[in-house]
Image: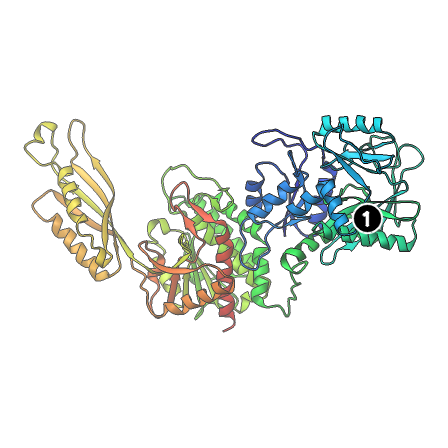
Amino acid sequence: MRIAVVYNRDSRNVINLFGMPNQEKIGLRTIERLSDALRAGGHQVTALEADKELISQLESFMPRVVKGERPGMVFNVSYGLQGQARYTHVPSILEMIGIPYVASGPLGHSLALDKVVTKMILRQHDIPTPDFVVLETPESPVPDDLRYPMIVKPKNEAVSFGLAVVDDEQALRESAHVIFERFRQPVLAEQFIEGREVNVGILGNAPPEAFPPVMLSFGTDGPQIYTYEDKTGRSGRTIEPLCPAPIPDELAQHTQDIAVRSFSALGLFDCARVDLRVDDDDNAYVLEVNSLPSLGEHGSYLVGAAHVGLDFAAFVNRLVEVASARYFGTPQPPPVDAKTADPSERVFQYVTQRRDQMERSLQQWVELPSRTDDPLGLARAADRAGRIFADIGMRPVPDLTDEPEAYMWETARGFDGGTLLIAHLDVPATGAALRQGFRRDPEWLYGEGIGRSRGSLVMLEYALRSLRSIRTLRRVPLGVLLYSDEGQDAIQSHALIRRAAERADHVIVCRPGTVDNGIVTQRRGSRRYELTVEGARLSPGQVGRRRTVANWTFDKLVAIGKLNAPNKRLSIAALDVHTERHAMFVPHRVEASLIMSYLDPAHADEAERSMRSILGRGGPTWHLTLLTDRPPMVDRPANQQVVEALESAAAAWDIPLDHESSGWPSVAGLVPEPASVVCGVGPVTRDRGTPDEAVQRISLVQRTLLLAEYLIGRAKR
């Protein structure tokens, strides 16, 4: 599980500083021990200061989860930065944004932090607590029946701040003035109980369990109370926690019962420490309840935990299990038995536990430049893919490998009559445009080619690794073909792709998924043309008497554009127009790049004839050359079998999935009948081909699970 240790120590990163600042500080040593203990428990851990950046940092560390996957959790040891009810600030934020956390909620913390409210609730539940009075001002009256000595403390503070024992009214008033000046809040004055101080730690919920009582030995020097100076090591004396407390068993049980009742009365969760005083007649009184007990090395709470066999690491991870049980019903996911557990569940565990590795692999792919016109980069990309598939346990298919345009691997069972997965290694871009590096935000991962190419490569890798982890991959008739000329309309690799597709029953093309969580069951084809027009060299003075080549060409392009027929799903557009001219002359040559998008080849043929007719005869010399023709992917009945299998896989993990048609071509159009084909199974992508190209983070996991679940189904056949 991802666990963020959230604390307050040094940060003042807030919009404004005002009000009473927090004076409680957690030690760096404690933060380090917590983090190390959680890592030892197998968790992914980060430590975060609880300031105004907390939400964005948590969102980045704990991205959204898929159905059945545990969200991250916060190990909350934050005392707050400033203001009232500081303990409630982080839990309130976590409740709002939907992140589980260890320890009590806002209501429990607020009740426990207000010592007067705590005592009132205790009395309502017949839990003994010393008599008291609240001084709203330093001169407020004190009831006659409240005897000295008394103990005074701020109404809403912790860690013994401002704590003092007073023996007469003068000392009471002086201490009250100090508290008012320093803490700016009312004073709690309560009967001082002569006797022993006992702490009882609480762990768990429904029902909570009490640790053995810990008695604090103050020695003979100084006050017989635990002061702030004692807790911070400034008093010069050593307070020894004795566990088990040297008290009768019946009294020990009684203090534990009182502690559990106090914990429940205040509505606390997971952990707390209840501080009591026991008089000479063995009467126990609750002084206060600490809803965030100190986890310092020598604190009484951990002393009690150690006495029941929980060292620090065991205690910390037990506390995570306790909180997990409260949120999820079980302390931890059920163990996976490699021989009996459901394969889908085991694949789910494999993929969801490797989010970080998947994103690191994606970053490595983004940082490996391999644009279509970069042969060296493409060679490095092919080398990396070869190492990955060799490590997965797939073997090359030499007769379907044609370096550097295409590479093929298959499982031990081969892929004839099975499934063929197709993706491409190149980033379909050319030229000297600035490369976009890898970056992330809470919802999206950015980088050059991350959606068009890189996301699908990572999806393929981890879907296959997950099947290998459950010893299923060898049984799946499966091939993987990677080509490297998508940016050139697969002009070199298309024949090999067609040959490979002829040997498979099902073909999945791992092009990016759509922003609406779609896969693609129909794609238009595309034809690219080059139009060249040459005419006479005209000076500016001749333009008025003769028509220029540029004007003639632009008029023809406008006329060709009118061939667009939405009802036939056919469109024609100019992509680039370049001119050539000599000095002091207008252009005499025009080159235009045209693209036709079509669904029906007959309509495309008709449109091409119309284009040539529009260009006509009698004008300047022109040539219209067909450069590439990518056939359409037709939504044929055979495709429905793959669509239904993918929809079933998506339903198993509550993955959103739709299917749609696309105006963009892909190599899916090369797949001949009777094979079934589906495209757009890659991760959900947006802004393809722009500097903001991105892959949805949760989709990277979802689509990997989707592909793995589909392949598990193929293995069962």
Q: Looking at the picture, tell me which residue is in the foreground, 50 or 643.
A: 50
Q: How many marks?
A: 1
Q: Whole-percent x and y of residue 54?
A: 58, 40
* Figure check: 410 above or below 173: below
* Figure check: 457 above or below 197: below
Which residue is at a point 17% across and 45% down the rendered structure image? Answer: 557
Q: Looking at the picture, tell me which residue is in the foreground, 164 or 668.
A: 164
- 406 left or right, relative to 144: left
Q: Whole-percent x and y of residue 231?
A: 81, 36
Which residue is at a point 84% across and 51% down the rendered structure image? Answer: 255
- 527 left or right, relative to 339: left
Q: Amino acid at mark 1?
A: Pro
* Figure check: 636 above or below 127: below
- 245 left or right, relative to 667: right
- 517 left or right, relative to 611: right
* Figure check: 221 above or below 35: above
Q: Looking at the picture, tell me which residue is in the foreground, 648 or 410.
A: 648
Judging from the image, the colouring scheme is rainbow
| Quarter of the rendering containing residue 630 | bottom left
Determine which residue is flagged by label 1.
Answer: 128
Q: Whole-percent x and y of residue 656?
A: 45, 59
Q: Whole-percent x and y of residue 532?
A: 19, 44
Q: Would you say residue 521 is visible in this rendering?
A: yes
**Crowd class of label 1 (few under 14; some 14 to 19; many from 20; radius 10 Å):** some
Q: Circle 1 — which element?
A: loop
Which residue is at a point 82% across and 49% down the rendered structure image? Answer: 304
Q: Looking at the picture, tell me which residue is in the foreground, 446 or 541.
A: 446
- Residue lying furthest left: 545
